[in-house]
């Protein structure tokens, strides 16, 4: 069984602060993929990053960075110099592969972290 | 512009009504998905269509009936729903590739209220 835990239910910061969103996962699959999605108040989930279990390199994209540590089963997300537009619910998700080697979008989501950035 | 369009954005229906949710994508994605999201909860997968054929049904009650008329359209027909079915229904498109779970492109959803 797969499980994703986002221990932080809500985080509130002031603009320009750095903020890290934690994600811990459990899986028995040797090959798996991790995702982060952002859900702004408008409702749609916006894809942020996909990382496979064999690639432990950290990634930086503008103000966003991700730290994948297989040894601790964590895939944490940091926003540097947060902005009001970053306010949203952030979901970490996990996907294994079925017998045919395709996941068909079956994501196991964490409970989400509500991030509020105040001006 | 969003790449996946859902209509209507809001829907209120009674338990005896029949209604349909519509989803359209023009990205050429070969897989389309319905997710259900209750308030303050993560999305839960309902159905997956791959190449216009139903490939996954996550034990969804028969009062929800999906339909994929063509590669660009996905419908969710609703009949005899219960108040607990009130939720945000999200459609997504993706391109399944063996060995590599695809990123999904989600629509803004239909907020459904069942009275």
Image: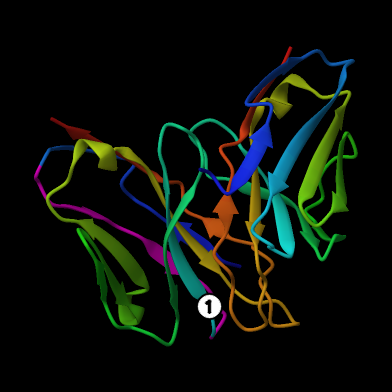
Residue at the image point whose x is 66% and y is 36% from the top: B6
Is B50 located above or below residue B1 in the figure?
A: below
Residue at the image point whose x is 21% and y is 36% from the top: A84
For this view, does A5 lie left or right of residue B95? left
For this view, does A19 lie left or right of residue A69? left
Task: Give the prevailing secondary structure in the magenta stretch.
Answer: loop
Q: Is residue A22 magenta?
A: yes
Nearer-the-camera pick, A55 or B2: B2
Quadrant in the picture for the C terminus of chain B:
top right
- Which residue position is annotated with label 1? A32
Nearer-the-camera pick, B67 or B62: B67
Q: Is residue B113 magenta?
A: no
* Residue B24 lies in quadrant: top right
* Residue A116 lies in quadrant: top left
- Tell me the chain of label 1: A
Q: Position of residue B19 (x, y in %)?
A: 84, 24
Q: Position of residue B114 (x, y in %)?
A: 73, 18
Which scheme is used to colour this image of the protein? rainbow
Magenta stretch: give its range: A16-30
Is B60 located above or below residue B77 in the figure?
A: below
For this view, does B94 lie left or right of residue A24? right
Nearer-the-camera pick, A62 or B48: A62
Q: Residues within 10 Å of mark 1 (few under 14, many from 20)?
A: some
Residue at the image point whose x is 79% and y is 22% from the top: B82
Residue at the image point whose x is 63% and y is 47% from the top: B44
């Amino acid at each position: 069984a797969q499980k994703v835990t986002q221990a932080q239910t809500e985080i509130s910061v002031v603009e320009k602060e750095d903020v890290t969103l934690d994600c811990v996962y459990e899986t028995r699959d040797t090959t798996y993929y991790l995702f982060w999605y952002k859900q702004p108040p408008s409702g749609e989930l916006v894809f942020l990053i996909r990382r496979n279990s064999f690639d432990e390199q950290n990634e930086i994209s503008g103000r966003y960075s991700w730290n994948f540590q297989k040894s601790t089963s964590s895939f944490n997300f940091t926003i540097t110099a947060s902005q009001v537009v970053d306010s949203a619910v952030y979901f970490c998700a996990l996907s294994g592969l079925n017998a045919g080697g395709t996941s068909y979008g079956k994501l196991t989501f964490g409970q989400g972290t509500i991030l509020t950035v105040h001006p | 512009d969003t790449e996946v369009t859902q209509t209507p954005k809001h829907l209120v229906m009674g338990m005896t009504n029949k209604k349909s949710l519509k989803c359209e994508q023009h990205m050429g994605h070969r897989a389309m998905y319905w997710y259900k999201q209750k308030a303050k909860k993560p999305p839960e997968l309902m159905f997956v269509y791959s190449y216009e054929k139903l490939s996954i049904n996550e034990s969804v009650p028969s009062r929800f009936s999906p339909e994929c008329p063509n590669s660009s359209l996905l419908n969710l027909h609703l009949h005899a729903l219960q108040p607990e079915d009130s939720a945000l229904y999200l459609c997504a498109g993706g391109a399944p590739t063996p060995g590599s779970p695809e990123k999904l492109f989600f629509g803004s959803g239909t907020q459904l209220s069942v009275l």
